[in-house]
Amino acid sequence: MQDQIPDASIELFSTCPPSSAAVQGRYVQRVIDVARWSEEAGCRGILVYSDNSLLDPWLLAQIIMENTATLCPLVAVQPVYMHPYAVAKLVASLGHLYGRRVYLNMLAGGFKNDLAALNDTTPHDHRYDRLVEYTSIIKALVGTTSAVSYDGAFYKIDKLKLTPSLAPGLFPGIFVSASSEAGLAAARTVGATAVKYPKPAGEEKISSEVNVEFGIRVGIIARATDEEAWAIAHARFPEDRRGQVTHQLAMKTSDSVWHKELSQKSAEVEHSPYWLGPFQNYKTFCPYLVGRYELVGDELARYIGIGYTRFILDVPSDLEELRHTNLCFQRALEVTRW
């Protein structure tokens, strides 16, 4: 595709549409369409959500791999749902079947009501301690052909061997939400990409962390002019009083640091493409950048300059939207080379 990002210094991931918003009988085709658009647009992978209300992300990951040639699923993994051995087995099995890498988006928490229903009362920061053990076991199992033993506070395994083993070169990429200090510490410990839900680039601080990759979750709507981009943005994400009430209720049932931080910000920032309208109307879970290609591209260049190299985009509306997004990243990469 002509508009793909021609630079390996950054990686783009799109997002699989959540099943909760699916039209009855059309969801599988919608997943396939979004996956194929993402691959054609040059995305490295695609995030697949997971919570108590959604379809199993591993089944969706297989649909994605079955219908694309190179796109890698970024599967959300919640430790409460399955043993780390099961995750390692799935990674190895998909690698064996498709010869393709799987990325893991390691989740420490979720909605309080979901966790309570599963009888998970582990405090917020301790969930990250558990996540470190959980991820360490997965990495050990997929990273060797030998038996693995582990004796931790949350998990113990004794001479556990993964068969079939994961093929060389398919070791999973690992992401961890790092909007809290506990999350950043966990990402550092397990060698994961630390993912944030960003503030405007001018409010983000340059990280002093070494040997830690950083990424952000952000949606993009860009066109040739600001007026056209904002018209599309407001048409796609109109104000929704019911959505605002749902968002407020969700904030009360979440102990997520990023959720609370973003909820306290105004929807729009003056002279900036940064927009929280979709998030505050409960239409999505990340900030958006809206405006002309140059404006959005310059904002992306600031994020890249800070140290963010992986970008997880929101669910694309169509292939054309991804082409517009790629124009912004092309601009960003040009700016960062100046």
Image (cartoon, rainbow, N blue to C red):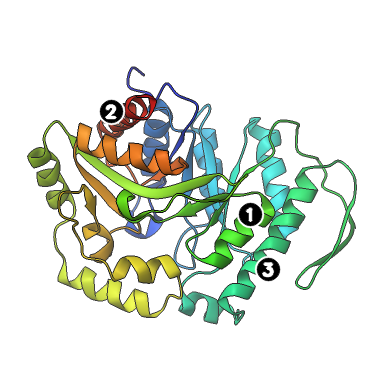
Q: Which residue, given by chain and number where applicable, does mark 1 sit on?
A: 188
Dot 2 or dot 1, earlier in sequence: 1
Callout 2 amino acid: Leu
Q: Quadrant of residue 295?
A: top left
Dot 2 or dot 3, earlier in sequence: 3
Distance between mark 2 and mark 3 Cα atoms: 41 Å
Q: Quadrant of residue 184?
A: bottom right
- Locate the C terminus by quadrant: top left
Q: Which residue, given by chain and number where applicable, does mark 3 sit on?
A: 130
The spot of residue 127 in percent (x, y) is: 62, 71
Callout 1 amino acid: Arg
Q: What secondary structure is found at the residue carrying circle 3? A: helix
Residue 108 visible in the current orientation: no
Label 3: few (<14), some or many (≥20) within 10 Å? some
The spot of residue 256 in percent (x, y) is: 45, 70
Give the mark toward the camera: 1 or 3: 1
Dot 1 or dot 3, earlier in sequence: 3
Q: What secondary structure is found at the residue carrying circle 1? A: helix
Q: Which residue, given by chain and number where applicable, does mark 2 sit on?
A: 327
Distance between mark 1 and mark 3 Cα atoms: 14 Å
Q: What secondary structure is found at the residue carrying circle 2? A: helix
Distance between mark 2 and mark 1 Cα atoms: 32 Å
Q: Residue at x 49, y 29 (%)?
A: 9
In this orientation, which residue lies closer to the viewer: 218 or 271? 271
In this orientation, which residue lies closer to the viewer: 310 or 31? 310
The spot of residue 7 in percent (x, y) is: 45, 24
Position of residue 2 relative to residue 311, above or below, is above
Instruction: Please report contact status of discs 2 and 1: CB closer than 8 Å, yes or no.
Output: no
Give the mark toward the camera: 2 or 1: 1
Callout 3 amino acid: Arg
Q: Quadrant of residue 77?
A: bottom right
Label 1: few (<14), some or many (≥20) within 10 Å? many
